[in-house]
Image: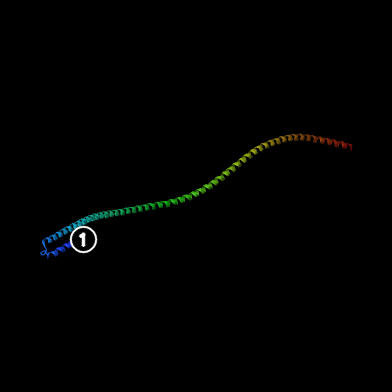
Amino acid sequence: MKNLNKIATGAAIVLMSLPTLAKTNVESSLQQLKTNSENSEFNYKQYQDNLDIVNKNVEQADKATKELQKMKKQLANNTKNVDKNKQSLADMEKDILKMKAGEQAKLTHEEKQIADVQKMLEKLQANKKKREENLASYDQMVLKVQQERKDWDTQVQQMAILQKELDLKEKKAREEKAAWQAKSNDYKSEAKKWAVQSKSSKDTYDKVKKMQD
């Protein structure tokens, strides 16, 4: 603003001094012109310096604008890359969800298979328990049969001993029978003999008695 004031003041002095040049001395006018020239040169330098500064600022602003445009372009490219990456991630997520759905289906199927296997296992375990009980029962039956066989063997042995005893007793009975039969024959012979003798004696007795009577 000070520089502008100087220019305006110089111009006014020039305009005011033109009508009075004839009245003033030349030296004074020259001095005034010199002052105006110096002021003008000073103002020129000031404006030129300001112009240089402004131009540099414009240049810096232009560089900044280009840098900002470059950054904007890079940002746009990055945005495109982000969108591309986001799309890739979306596609990847879609594939992952598809694989997850497949795994879930397999898991559901395998869980059903596990449930079926568990039911079958429970059934087999129940059958195993029942068969173990049957085996234990059969073992008891085998032991009982074996014991009965032993009892029969014992009875056979006892019967064999009894058979021997019976054989001995039968032999003894036969021997006693034979002895008694022998005695019976002797007694029968004697009895027959004595029967004849008794009859003969009785007949004799009867005859003698009858004769006496």
Above/below status of 59 relative to 188:
below
Name which residue type carries label 1: Lys
Q: Measured from the top left, where is residue 182 in percent x and y?
A: 74, 34
- Compare residues 159 and 207 and report the one nearer the observer: 159
Residue 109 placement, left or right of 23: right
- Locate residue 31: give its quadrant: bottom left
Q: Measured from the top left, where is residue 209 in percent x and y?
A: 87, 37
Count of marks, rendered view: 1
Question: Dot 1: what SS?
Answer: helix
* Neighbourhood count class around disc 1 (C-alpha, 10 Å): few under 14, some 14–19, many 20 upward: few
Q: Which residue lies furthest to the right in this view?
A: 213
According to the picture, the residue beneath numbered tag 1 turns out to be 2
Residue 93 placement, left or right of 59: right
Q: Measured from the top left, where is residue 190 in percent x and y?
A: 78, 34
Q: Quadrant where the N terminus lies? A: bottom left
Residue 151 placement, left or right of 72: right
Q: Residue furthest bottom?
A: 19
- Compare residues 39 and 170 and report the one nearer the observer: 39
Q: Measured from the top left, where is residue 66 in percent x and y?
A: 24, 54
- Compare residues 201 and 42 and report the one nearer the observer: 42
Above/below status of 196 relative to 8:
above
Q: Quadrant where the C terminus lies? A: top right
- Compare residues 121 and 80 and report the one nearer the observer: 80
**Which residue occupies 80% across, 35% down?**
194
Q: Which colour scheme is used?
A: rainbow
Above/below status of 172 relative to 109:
above
**Which residue occupies 39% across, 52% down?**
100
